[in-house]
Image (cartoon, helix red, strand yellow):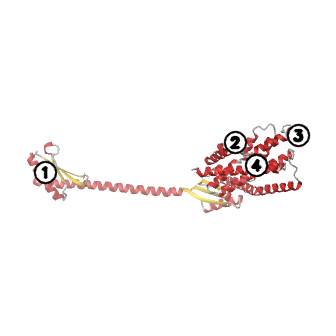
């Protein structure tokens, strides 16, 4: 029974010949001609994807990238102690890194889009989980290489380990002088490189790949020491960053649980902001406003769950502010109504003054011209290109229709009298305006 189960896990019946494996790995090391052009095109595609924050475009670039070959070659060469192959793989690897950095830097230097989106930011904060992804991804990739049934494993490994985006992010950091992007992205790329190569090294020895050259024990020991040191130095920062990542994730979950449990009578939470890196929570409330005691209770409640956490409480929209706004609105409405009443009173008074003046003028005119039976007075505005002035119109009606000569004489006499009486030179006099022959005005 156990033998059958072990047989299911065995790779011996699918493993390719050692020579075929060797030739396959060596052929993947060289990056020139077609592979070089594909590398540059993939770098441009990945840079565009990062620039426009498109995950699909970035995945497309990773699928066609030939960066995996030299890294697998380094691990395979160390596993078989073929130091000439290691040097050749390192040479090609460094060449591809330089080309990738140059192409991505040139792209971001000319691109009008300089904002760092989430896809760029994701490549600047590696941690221990990236180590696990790189190692097991490299292990899966090497298993696919030594197997006769490769399938689509290499494609999946290229996507999972993501060698291309960190190099493009490093190019973005160089082009925009943001060195934190450069350092973070190069560290992620280093993690991927070291642990993919380590996985290839371990898998090479597990699969019993024969040694190409029989190196002496001293060189083997030196090589193993270098490998151990590089792995250790690469691993330490990722562990520290991984612990920080776990701590921030725990704080984020704790903070969301704390926020979801906040219930204060006559107040409601408008918005909140959680900053895990600073262990800080910011709350903005609406309602009647929190008392000092309620604020202190919230702070103490948070400290019981996370002693190092900080809480900021702000008052956004308050019902008390709404009351103040209503009071101010009512005052404005009252003032507007008062002004409207004043204007109405002024208009009425003006109309009454006009009527009273007209009555006085009619009484005075009838002393000299008893035939005048009515008089109307109106004030109008007269506008021209040069100026604007106020005119006074007198409409006089007489009992007997005067002749044209008498009408003109009457208009002139009344106009002269009215100018002195009203102390205004802009006087218009109309005699019986309903009669066309005598309705011409006189100033």
Q: CA distance from mark 1 to mark 4?
A: 110 Å
User: Residue 361 or 236: which is nearer the viewer?
Assistant: 236
User: Residue 427 or 347: which is nearer the viewer?
Assistant: 427
Give the tally of numbered discs: 4
Q: CA distance from mark 1 to mark 2?
A: 109 Å
Say if mark 1 contacts mark 4, CB within 8 Å. Answer: no
Of discs 3 and 2, which sits in the foreground?
2
Of discs 1 and 2, which sits in the foreground?
2
Image point 65% across, 43% down: which residue?
Answer: 57
Residue carrying label 4:
134
Of discs 1 and 3, which sits in the foreground?
3
Q: Position of residue 411 (x, y in %)?
A: 13, 51
Determine the secondary structure under disc 3.
helix
Of discs 1 and 4, which sits in the foreground?
4
Quadrant for the N terminus, please.
top right
Residue carrying label 3:
6
């Amino acid at each position: 029974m156990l033998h059958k189960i072990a047989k299911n896990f065995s790779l011996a019946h699918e493993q390719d010949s050692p020579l075929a494996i060797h030739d396959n790995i060596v052929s993947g090391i060289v990056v020139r001609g077609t592979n070089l052009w594909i590398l540059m095109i993939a770098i441009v595609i990945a840079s565009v994807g990062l620039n426009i924050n498109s995950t699909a475009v970035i995945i497309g670039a990773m699928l066609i990238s030939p960066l995996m070959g030299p890294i697998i070659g380094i691990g395979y060469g160390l596993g078989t102690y073929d130091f000439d192959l290691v040097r050749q793989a390192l040479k090609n690897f460094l060449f591809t890194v330089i080309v990738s950095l140059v192409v991505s830097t040139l792209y971001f230097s000319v691109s009008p889009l300089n904002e760092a989106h989430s896809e760029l930011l994701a490549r600047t904060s590696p941690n221990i989980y990236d180590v696990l992804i790189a190692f097991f991804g490299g292990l899966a990739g090497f298993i696919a290489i030594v197997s006769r049934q490769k399938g689509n494993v290499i494609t999946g490994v290229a996507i999972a380990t993501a060698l291309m985006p960190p190099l493009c992010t490093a190019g973005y950091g160089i082009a925009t002088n943001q060195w934190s992007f450069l350092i973070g992205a190069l560290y992620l790329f280093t993690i991927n490189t070291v642990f993919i190569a380590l996985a290839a090294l371990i898998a090479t020895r597990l699969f019993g790949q024969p040694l190409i050259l029989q190196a002496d024990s001293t060189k083997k020991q030196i090589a193993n020491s270098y490998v151990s040191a590089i792995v250790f130095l690469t691993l330490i920062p990722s562990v520290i960053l991984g612990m920080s990542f776990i701590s921030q994730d725990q704080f984020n979950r704790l903070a969301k649980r704390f926020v979801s449990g906040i219930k204060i009578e006559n107040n409601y939470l408008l918005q909140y902001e959680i900053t895990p890196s600073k262990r800080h929570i910011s709350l903005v409330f609406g309602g009647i406003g929190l008392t000092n005691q309620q604020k202190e209770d919230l702070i103490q409640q948070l400290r019981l769950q996370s002693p190092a956490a900080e809480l900021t409480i702000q008052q956004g929209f308050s019902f008390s502010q709404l009351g103040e706004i209503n009071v101010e609105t009512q005052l404005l409405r009252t003032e507007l109504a008062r002004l409207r009443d004043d204007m109405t009173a002024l208009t009425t008074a003006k109309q009454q003054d006009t009527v009273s003046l007209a009555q006085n003028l009619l009484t005075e005119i009838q002393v000299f011209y008893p035939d005048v039976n009515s008089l109307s007075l109106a004030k109008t505005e007269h506008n021209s290109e040069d100026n604007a002035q106020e005119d006074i119109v007198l409409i006089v009606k007489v009992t007997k229709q005067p002749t044209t000569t008498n009408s003109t004489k009457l208009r002139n006499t009344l106009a002269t009298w009215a100018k002195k009486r009203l102390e205004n030179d802009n006087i218009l006099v109309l005699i019986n305006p309903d009669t066309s022959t005598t309705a011409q005005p006189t100033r």
